[in-house]
Amino acid sequence: MISNYVLLGLSQLLIFVSSAHTHTKACTPDTFASLGLSNINVFSVDAKIDHAHWNTAGTLNAYPAPTNATAKVCQLKVNYTYPSWNDKVTTWISLPVDDWNGQFMGMGGGGWVTGSLGALSQAVFGSYAAASTNGGHDERATVQSWAMTSEGNLNWGNIQDFSSVAIDETASLGKAATKIFYGQSQKYAYWNGCSTGGRQGHILAQRYPTQYDGILAGSPAINWDKFPLAELWPQL
């Protein structure tokens, strides 16, 4: 009988062998000039070689212990808008240069933060191509500054970006960039998120079930019509 440890070792060896034969393109804006989707208007794509550092702010779900090492990546920053919404969304995509495992991972956010560049390092250290998005607003911005156009009037474009639309577009952009850079599509795609990232995992499974082959949705922050009010009640 072959043990699970042997099977795991063989699977990791196969991933290593497949990644060792991956030929990457130049990490320049010209390489990704065709990156885009039919439902958005991309107004800039930045691409450069960078070195990802472990995110010292904490880990998401089941990642290994922190490390002081760095990982060489092709770092993309895609800025776009959804026609008629007047929004400005940023998506970050990190592509390992030397040891891609042939897979893709979307990374979620927390609280009112849709996602972040820092979260990608945790996926990159696992040799995943990875993507995350700011969902149309800076993570340090007040909720009122992006969720409302004026007193009593909601900014539905930004709210939809945060709730679901931007994470769907980020998956599509991340996979497209992966194929451009490595010359082949990912074998599997996974989502990893906790709290708001967990909620995002649930909404991805419900609305965009074909984007990911597996979803890790920790402590999902759902029932938003109840728990924000419950948090305010003691203060009231």
Image (cartoon, grey):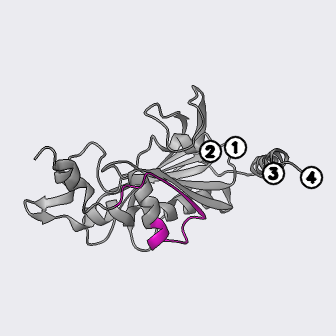
Q: Which region shows up in magenta? A: 204-222
The residue lying at 16 percent from left, 45 percent from top is 234
Q: Quadrant of residue 127?
A: top right
Alpha-carbon span between mark 4 and mark 3: 20 Å
Q: Is residue 206 magenta?
A: yes
Find disc 4 in the rendering and name its residue.
Answer: 1
Disc 1 is placed on an element classified as loop
Using the image, tell me which numbered label, if any, was put on residue 14.
Answer: 3
In percent of width and height, residue 185 lies at 66, 63
Using the image, tell me which numbered label, if any, was put on residue 99.
Answer: 1
Of 9 and 227, the residue lying toward us: 227
Residue type pointed to by label 2: Pro
Disc 2 is placed on an element classified as strand
Alpha-carbon span between mark 3 and mark 1: 13 Å
Using the image, tell me which numbered label, if any, was put on residue 96.
Answer: 2
Alpha-carbon span between mark 4 and mark 2: 36 Å
- Mark 4 and mark 1 lie on one chain; the one further toward the N terminus is 4
